Image: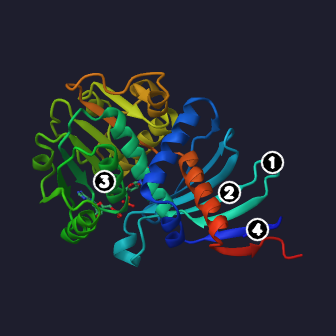
Amino acid sequence: MKLKDFEILFLNDKQIEELVPSKKVFELTETSLAEYAAGNAVNPVKLHLPIYPDYEGYINSMPAYLKRLKIAGAKIVSVYRDNIKLFKLPSTIGTVLLHNPESGMPYAIMNGTYITAARTGAVMGVMAKYTVRNNAKSLTIIGAGAQGFSAFIMISLAVPSIEEIRVVDIKAEAQDNFIAMAKAAFPDKTYVKYNSIQEACKNCDIILAAATSDKPLLANINFAKGSTVLIIEEDFGNTFIEKFDKFVGDFRECLIERINDDAKHHFELTGELVDELTEDSVTAEIGDIIIGKTKGRTSDDEIILAASVGMGIQDIIVGKEAYDRAVEQGIGIVIDFVGK
Ligand SMILES: NC(=O)c1ccc[n+]([C@@H]2O[C@H](COP(=O)([O-])OP(=O)(O)OC[C@H]3O[C@@H](n4cnc5c(N)ncnc54)[C@H](O)[C@@H]3O)[C@@H](O)[C@H]2O)c1
């Protein structure tokens, strides 16, 4: 397939999932974080548009540019935690746009829902690769939804020694679906359902928080020596990070802004205060660890916290891969952008 100027390729979610498998998303995500750390990326702090309190959701705009790889574009992503219950729609829905960095002309528009879950999981996988202790055996997943499942896949790719998966969710159906899909991907692991986060985290090597909860879930948990706590979603402040020897983030400035915004929203909902973090709270960015500028885990005793806020560069690098493979294979719908 060859696209003309003023033509845009549209790709749907299923096509992208088939074009860019998990392993490839993992590699691309690591590359995007390394490019960022090496100064080869422009990734502004995401613009957060709260729709709450009118509706329990928000929409983020995430422009990004990978200079050396010549990929520019943006993702728009919405998170509506009650979507499954109210509309049978995913909680997290994305759209990715790619632009030619030379002319600014858009050349692709695609569903970014799989891309979001895959790259969010992949950041957790990359963080696990550099922060999990040797020979880790157990993984607790809190929130058995789209992001939790993708993170499970990516962490399992990064840490093949994991044998036992503990699955916590307030919905038994979500636990059952998760375990059925997980068994199909990794049949040799043991899967156990838990209702108590406290119990699931006992002597656990890796804990992943990915629940759409409006209250902090990990505040009162004691983490085992040598464990790694990976966070996709959780409200926390200074008291929480004091439990850890290191706090690794993907994008320091944006992560702290987001955690503090979430804390304010949490306060509006519940009246409970969460103490604010500063950029110094983050010990290291994962990209700096990948390129060897600083170290990840340095001993099997450390307790490490790693959290991601998500970056547009992670989305556009996967989007570009989907585009390239689609053009090669003649997949997608070509749209005339101008009509004259
Ligand atoms: N950091 C990032 O880059 C990034 C990217 C995308 C989404 N997110 C966040 O990830 C979160 C999860 O998104 P998703 O698309 O997986 O949603 P989802 O609805 O698919 O899954 C969330 C799961 O959490 C469960 N849950 C809710 N409250 C719980 C509780 N108290 N205990 C245990 N489980 C509970 C729900 O039952 C559901 O199964 C969202 O809040 C979103 O903001 C973060």
CB atoms of marks 4 and 1 within 8 Å: no
Marks 3/2: CA–CA distance: 28 Å
Query: Which circle marks residue 98 in the picture?
Result: 2
Q: Which is more foreground, mark 4 or mark 3?
A: 4
Query: Which circle marks residue 2 in the picture?
Result: 4
Please indicate whether residue 128 sits to the left or right of residue 27 in the image: left
Marks 4/3: CA–CA distance: 37 Å
Which residue is label 3 attached to? 152
Q: Residues within 10 Å of mark 3 (few under 14, many from 20)?
A: many
CB atoms of marks 3 and 2 within 8 Å: no
Residue 237: x and y in percent read 33, 35
Mark 2 or mark 4, earlier in chain: 4
Mark 1 residue type = Glu
Which residue does the image show at 24% across and 53% down from the upper left?
142
Mark 4 or mark 3, earlier in chain: 4
Mark 2 residue type = Leu
Q: Nearer the viewer, residue 281 or 334?
A: 334
Q: Residues within 10 Å of mark 1 (few under 14, many from 20)?
A: few
Mark 3 residue CB less than 8 A from any atom of ligand 1: no
